[in-house]
Image (tube, coloured by chain):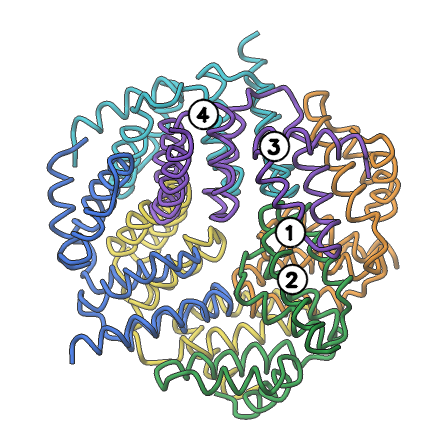
Chain colours: A green, B orange, C purple, D cyan, E blue, F yellow
Amino acid sequence: MSKEDRVNGEVIRREVMSDVFVDRALNSISEFERPMQDMAMENAWGGPWTRDDLPRDTRSLVTIAMLVALRATNELKGHVRGALRNGATKEEIRAVILHSAAYCGFPAALSAMKVVSEVVESWEAEND
Amino acid sequence: MSKEDRVNGEVIRREVMSDVFVDRALNSISEFERPMQDMAMENAWGGPWTRDDLPRDTRSLVTIAMLVALRATNELKGHVRGALRNGATKEEIRAVILHSAAYCGFPAALSAMKVVSEVVESWEAEND
Amino acid sequence: MSKEDRVNGEVIRREVMSDVFVDRALNSISEFERPMQDMAMENAWGGPWTRDDLPRDTRSLVTIAMLVALRATNELKGHVRGALRNGATKEEIRAVILHSAAYCGFPAALSAMKVVSEVVESWEAEND
Amino acid sequence: MSKEDRVNGEVIRREVMSDVFVDRALNSISEFERPMQDMAMENAWGGPWTRDDLPRDTRSLVTIAMLVALRATNELKGHVRGALRNGATKEEIRAVILHSAAYCGFPAALSAMKVVSEVVESWEAEND
Amino acid sequence: MSKEDRVNGEVIRREVMSDVFVDRALNSISEFERPMQDMAMENAWGGPWTRDDLPRDTRSLVTIAMLVALRATNELKGHVRGALRNGATKEEIRAVILHSAAYCGFPAALSAMKVVSEVVESWEAEND
Amino acid sequence: MSKEDRVNGEVIRREVMSDVFVDRALNSISEFERPMQDMAMENAWGGPWTRDDLPRDTRSLVTIAMLVALRATNELKGHVRGALRNGATKEEIRAVILHSAAYCGFPAALSAMKVVSEVVESWEAEND
């Protein structure tokens, strides 16, 4: 385990996902689940997310593209919020979903659009 | 069928994929395959690719992200070349593949990296 | 965008999915989601669904086969109802699901069977 | 193991895939692989394929639909040939592939179309 | 249909999944769904699960590995319980999920971890 | 980046995959691909593979199970060899593939079986 990656990962995860979200995630897990959280923090958040080879908003759009293709609806929810926090506009996020219809098919795109729409709506209600 | 979408789609496909590539694709297909090519031209190239809600290099990176997640190796090849033509750098393309390891797993990422590496190499040989 | 495909698509979608269903879908979406709905209406309903190269009940069975393989449970629900409206019998729909066990595996087949069973039951209650 | 399912399965597999194909498959496998072949013969060919709840040409189209969605290119090849032997026309097979673009995305549909086109061509050369 | 496989399959399914679970499953299905249940009982439970080429706890871990990769969350739930009944420890089950992060990506692994954690918790409450 | 994970990962990868294989992999990659190899070495080989919560032969079988479900044929090849090196018998590896037919479907299982059979054959030729 790399302590440094773990620490850097948590910093970025908090920037992208917000303190509220990360605190809730960390507080709700049991000891049993902790190694999984540590691994995600070290290898995902402390891995590619720490690299400077993509602007952070583009990285968010790329992440959303992958989650739509994988039909990972739950994880999509958090990353749409993260994309908005990273400075991607709702129109850009929608553009990725529209684009996915041609590559991943309409069932994946329509399911994703529903998630995006809900997150955008509650995001706008909070930030009015 | 929308003639206009079909025509606009071919213009963009030629810009992204090059005349050589599109001519070869169109000349190699039989009458039997034509409706499939028309549909791709109209609904994929003449659809989201004609929208102005994403810069074209970002759209290429997003496309690559989906193709890695779908493990669509053959289609990836063409779109890596398209991404380079659209102004994405090889480092940005690599960044998407590195990012995919965390979201799609290493088998998908490693296979994709091999494709990207080969396309980038032959691209650089041609453009030296 | 092709206005004609859009219009033809809505006609077929209403025939397959019922006015009630389509009205609800169209009324519940926000302006933000509209381009996605338009794209689905134009390119899916106004695309292959308008072709006469498959009888409509066979097309429904083929759609169900794809949705099971993609594990697109939500979309499956609507298309099982559409298949019944298109004249496929519940035994034929079940046959597709049983067939999927061998090709997509039992987890996909069993999940699909649960959806099919619920839709068929409520369809029969309505049409008694 | 059910001997009866095994025997019935082989009869149907020979009808759908041809004696030449099945003989080659059975002769090329080692003792080590035999249990896999037996399981496929008993549970796939001797399972849903023996049921009379779908006409055999429709069952072939449904199988192709699943294989496109699963991106199972190798298996698709054999089943396109099987579909033609089962009385499906090449236009119906193409219809399934065109339909798949909307549900499985263009990468899956385009890859499948290439396979279908090759099999149809060699089928027509043989049956002229 | 093989009556013997069907009977053997039910015996093993009851050993792995418990009488309570299997009785509930069998009692809740309609006549319409019965052929699907019979097929699962004969070909999955009465098929590989009857073979003696893997210890039963290893077979459970292998099943879990596949379900994570397929993102078959519902089926995963039952098989985590089955794995515990088959003698796999909760640490071994967690090890499979941690391992899946590298091969299937974090979204699949994190979703699976949540399911595993819930099942383990209620299993321990029952068996205290 | 964790230097320690990177070093531990390479040790294990060499034990599982053999020096010949790892040397060839490391020597064949370009500078451009190096970050991908480093990430795989650190996070996959230096991650779950370093944990002691599964015996190494079981871990290999679990890896194979995931690769079959993901249809990652290329990566499967290397890991079948790794499984044999880790002490799994060819009968156990086959058991995982047979098991996968019920969970991942026959197309995935049959493709995997072909790969396994070829690797086992060449492994036995080398180790006679």
Q: What's the amino acid at mark 3?
A: His
Q: Are marks 3 and 4 in contact (CB under 8 Å)?
A: no
Residue C31 placement: quadrant: bottom right
Mark 2 or 3, which is nearer the eye?
A: 2
For marks 3 and 1, give the CA distance: 27 Å
Above/below status of A15 relative to A113: below
Residue A52 in the image, given as x and y percentages of width and height = 73, 79
Mark 3 or 4, which is nearer the eye?
A: 4
- The residue beneath circle 3 is D99
Q: Which mark is residue F8?
A: none
- The residue beneath circle 1 is C28
Residue sitting at x 86%, y 42%? B14
Chain assignment, label 4: C
Secondary structure, mark 3, is helix
Secondary structure, mark 1, is helix
Secondary structure, mark 2, is helix
